[in-house]
Image (spheres, grey):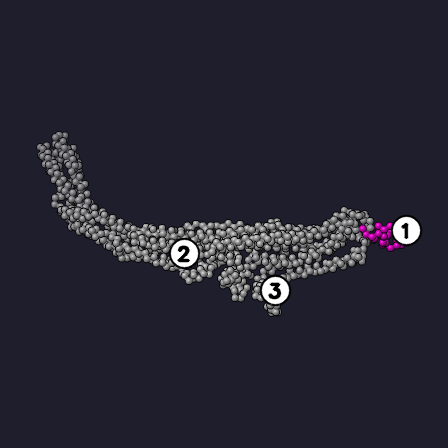
Amino acid sequence: MAWKVGLVLLMCWGFTSSKPHEELQSSTESPPADLNMVPLETLDFGFVPEVGYETQTLYEPGAIGSLFQLVHAFLYMVQPNPFPKDFIVKILQQNLRGFNPAELQKPENIVLTLQVLYYELGFLVLVMLGVLFVLLMPLLGCCFCLCRCCGNCGGELHQRHRKNADCWRSFHATSLLLSSIFIALGVLIAYTANHNISTKIKTTRHIVNTNIRDLKLFANYTPTQIDYLTAQYTTAKNKVLSDLDNIGPLLGGRIRRQLEKEVVPALDKALHMTGAMRETREALESLSASVEVLQEDTGHLQRALQSERISLTTTLSDPACERGEMARTCNTIRAALGQLALNSDFRGLPDINTQLSKLETVMKTDLSYIIQKGYSAFNDIPRVVSEQTKGVNPRVKALLDKSGAEIVNFVKMFPVEPAVDNFTKFLAEGQKKIEAYYPQIDQLDFYRWVGCVALCCVLVLILAFNLLGLLCGTCGYDKNATPTTRGCLSNNGGNLLMAGVGISFIFSWVLMGVVVPIFFTGGNMEKLVCEPLGSAQLFEVIDTPYLVHPGKKNFLPGLLFQDPEIDLTMGSLYRDCYKNNGIYAALHLENKFSFSKFINTTVFNDELTEIFEGLNVDLQGIILLEQEGKDNLINFANTGLGEINYQAYLSVVNKGVTAGDLLSFTNELETQADQLPRGALANALRGHASSIRHIHKTQVVPKEQAMSSLSQSIRLLQTTSKELPSKVTNVLSAIEAVEYLITSNATHIVKQETDKYVKNMLGYFRQYTHWVQHSLTTDVAQCKPISNIIDSLEIIGCRFIIDSVNTIWFGLGGCSLFLIPSIITSVKLAKFYRRMDTEDVLDDYPSYDTMTRYPPASAPPRQLDW
């Protein structure tokens, strides 16, 4: 009982304690469903301290493995039936629940007995044959001895003459040699297996020691691993506190990103209106300045053109213009003088000073600055959130510190160190007790080794007689010698063979008597224990529901936790431990203590949820556009740009500067001058052309450029005046809409983003609980030593001992069987090697019988023969 309590307490680290379990059942509640959210950032909890176990359960038998496989194949021939799980379960249930001999008469028990006999049929047949061998061999030996004493069964030293005697002798010698070879192989197999047991028994000490060391490592590292789990709560807590310290950029930034899709475009439109104001003022100023310049330049140009026209008229008054062709040329020039006149007059255009004055008044207000204040107020949402939630951080920090202290205090409630010490002492005491049996085990193993070697020595003695008899008989055999004149060497060979026959009769039944019980026990152990243990079928028998008691479903949880209804089996425990999973998952400790529920109850408590749900952010104090900015936009729309008579400006601008193209006029004038004869008139006309070209270059061209700029300003103003009211209205409507969104409808966005923020923070604890659950399942208290113990028992019991024992009876049993042909052939062959007393000979005298019996060769001659 002490080992069970110590082991379970250590493995569970106190998790199966009844008092904490009751407290947990009364206080555990599932966390809210909306907390199940994966955080944006994956926390790094590091790695649970690993334990390197020393025991190796990979067994390779080496060269002797082929012998083991041969024995397994033989056992399969003897017992090819599958593992009898059903009737073994029935037998165990009857025996474990109390055996009543009267129940054997029940039909179901009779059927069960027949099933057992049918399953054991192969073993029973061989056992009966072995028993017959044990009973008959000494009886046959006695009969054979009496028979020979009576001169029969080869006891008479007389050999009849046969024509094929050499063939029979060779046949018997070969048979005996083969039998001896098989007996020698059996001896070698038995001795090898016998030596293997002794070697492997010495190895078991190392296996036992490594298993105990692994259990100590398991015991000593488990508290450290649990402490590491609890310590990593600080990682999640620090991350939550870090997010709370940065609640402004995190939560406020999320709120701002959700609102900026509506707010920023509205502010951008308002900011764009400041550019429109500047462009409009620049256009008005350009229009006003251009008109003034054009009005002033128009006077200068008019005077220059008038002066040039008068001068040209005076030139054309020259008397030379009245003669012939020259007169016609002069008249042509005189007719084109109308081109030297102005075509547009800017002095009657409407005044725009009123609109310009209003616009100057509007521009005195720095609308750009007002809008930038709106940008700043909107971008300042993270700071507003931080200020409004600054009271949450201390409360959450205090609560998290409290939860961490509860976890630590809960851990300290369990007597970890005493449990570890007690379990370590239990292991040390167990190791001492095991080591105390080592001398006895060595002594017993020595006796076993001596016994097996003695049996092998008997067989070796028989082999020695057989082989020496063959050697002496073969070497001393003389074909020319008669049976009565055989040499001493040949005679000794026959005697050695008969000595081997005598020893075979004496010890063969003893050998078989040893083989039969070992065969029946070892073979059934292999078929009923080792094979099903290797294929996990044995666990299915052990894990059969209600095997031990009709009211207890599973015996293992009933043994460990006094709760047989827990779905825990030996098979599942072994599989989990073989995978090196944690003892928490292997023993299904969540049925007795759910650590994840405890963490959820401690971390996700109602007070923490209430604090987070109490997060409230108010954005009503945010002003995107002050009333001054709105009034400024309205005043801009009311500057009277639409009242300007743009058509009057465009009608003047669209006219040319002069009545005709001065460049064309000068070119034509120069052409006419070239047609005149050289003289003063032609030179004068060329001078006028040069003057007019100069006027065009210095006055007309700049005026045309000014008129083009003026046309652009007019068209810009005309377009602006048409679109301005709608643009201002749209901007003001957008600003009012987003302001309404922030002050009235932003509550939903704030609530939504706050919930996401809270879920993300609680998600860090969710990560921690999931990591704890995963670590408890796979990394903490890895129970590989438990599966190693089972594997080590399987290796020691089945691979080291059972396989070797089965190989021993296989070798000795084969020797026992081959002793029978060895006896027969030895008796037959001894006739050909031993010196006979009498023999059959062929008589040359026809008056006598053809066959006469001669006296023994060693007898002296009778007197009548002298």
Front: mark 1 or 2: 2
| Residue corresponding to mark 3 | 115
Q: Position of residue 309 (x, y in %)?
A: 11, 37
Give the Cα distance between marks 2 and 3. 61 Å
Marks 1 & 3, CB-CB < 8 Å contact: no
State the mark number for residue 863. Answer: 1
Residue pushed farthest top?
679
What segment carries the magenta color? 835-863
Give the Cα distance between marks 1 and 2. 125 Å
Q: Amino acid at mark 2?
A: Glu
Q: Is residue 854 located in the magenta-colored stretch of the structure?
A: yes
Q: In this view of the protein, can residue 659 be seen by the observer?
A: no
| Residue corresponding to mark 2 | 406
Q: Is residue 785 left or right of residue 79?
A: left
State the mark number for residue 299. Answer: none
Mark 2, other Cα within 10 Å: few <14 / some 14–19 / many ≥20:
some
Q: Amino acid at mark 1?
A: Gln
Front: mark 2 or 3: 2
Label 3's element? helix
Label 1's element? helix
Q: In this view of the protein, can residue 462 be seen by the observer?
A: yes
